[in-house]
Amino acid sequence: MILSPQSQLLERNISLFEKGEWAFINPSDAYFLDSLKSQEVTVVHQYFDVFSESVRVIPSASFDSRDINRKGFEVTQKVGNHTHIFAPFVTLEKSHTDVMIFLPKAKTHFQMLLRMAAGMVGQHGHIHVVGENKGGIKSAAKLMQQYGTTQKVDSARHCSLITVVVDEPHIAFEADAWVDINTYTVEGTSWQVATMPGVFSYKELDAGTELLLEKLSSSLSGEILDFACGAGVIASYIMLKYPHLKLHLTDVSALAVYCSALTLAENQLSATLYAADGLHGITQKIQHIVTNPPFHTGVKTDYTITKRFISDAKACLSRGGTMQMVANRFLPYPGLLSEHFQTVYTTAQTSQFSVYQAAL
């Protein structure tokens, strides 16, 4: 049990949590809240890994994309006095006196979380933000000033904790104000994609994904998995081009699952969506995996997600199954792939990206 630096900073300030009705947004680990066992708190998780570690009973959640509408979705689990909610957003209004946000990577994502927190605490409520100094906490303080006067509470472990008292009333969070719908075109196929702050490649078609789609194998059949699906770009393109295929989409992010459902709906498509850490929940055999997998955790380059995914993918694929994957050229994926797959080809390359096809 290792507390993240952010949680270690909060532990130093444990007396802060003795008063008020507290909610936490995107805690960076599942363990800090153990020190608040006796208090009723609400925890909003946009990431399934920490949610599932916190509730310790749900390895994955699956949805029919048609069941997710603009209102979002939530998976709620109570653990003692704590209510854990896995959701892309919450529309709680004046429900808490204090909200603690763990600073996300993207500035626009943080702006969205601030707006959500302002609805939760209302006028005179407190929004607190904890984050790593190198993760942009200084510019976060500037963004917080639009809600009221900010105050630095403490800094330690290369992290800072900042508080703002909200000086205006705010209504509940409205997701529609943050959803962007854009038209993408690849190889003569145009389609609509819904994105939100905090989702990979927000508002633009990622160059790596575009290359992957341009070089897509034309011999796809059966059940296809879009791993780390983001806004559902890959899956929706495949379904429009090859309507006979059955798609499964999985991502650790509730915002990604939500945007994927909206993207599918925009194009009159439907598929099964999974919220999971890695490949949990995929129980049936898959013929092909098509993916642009993540290699970042926070600000650092991190291969562990993809390493684990490559070894798990082998168990998921049927005999003769393939994986098509795009990645930054500097990443050591050909070696990792050939540890688990019989044949590995590079099917396309630019100065920045490589597309690999691996077969069992």
Image (cartoon, rainbow, N blue to C red):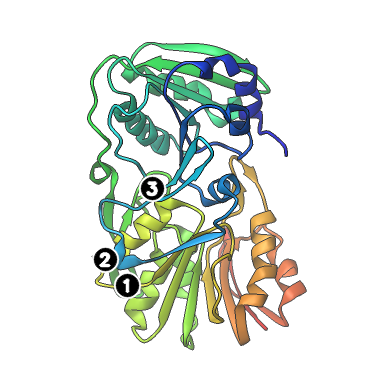
Q: Is residue 134 left or right of residue 95?
A: right
Query: Secondary structure under badge 1?
Result: loop
Q: Are marks 2 and 1 in contact (CB under 8 Å)?
A: yes
Q: Which residue is mark 3?
A: 88
Question: Where does the image place residue 22, in percent across and percent down from the top left?
Answer: 44, 26
Cα distance in 3D space between marks 3 and 1: 19 Å
Residue 270 numbered mark, or none: 1
Where 210 falls versus 142 (above or below)?
below
Residue 205 numbered mark, or none: none
Where 101 falls versus 44 (above or below)?
above
Sequence-wise, the earlier of marks 3 and 1 is 3
Q: How many marks?
A: 3
Where 343 falls versus 60 (above or below)?
below
Q: Are marks 2 and 3 in contact (CB under 8 Å)?
A: no
Amino acid found under the numbered disc labelled 2: Ala
Sequence-wise, the earlier of marks 2 and 1 is 2
Amino acid found under the numbered disc labelled 1: Ser
Amino acid found under the numbered disc labelled 3: Pro
- Residue 184 appearing in the image: no
Cα distance in 3D space between marks 2 and 1: 7 Å
Query: Secondary structure under badge 2?
Result: helix
Query: Secondary structure under badge 3?
Result: loop
Where 312 falls versus 231 (above or below)?
below
Q: Is residue 323 left or right of residue 117?
A: right
Q: Which residue is mark 2?
A: 265
Q: Are marks 3 and 1 in contact (CB under 8 Å)?
A: no
Question: Where does the image place residue 201, in percent across and percent down from the top left?
Answer: 43, 52
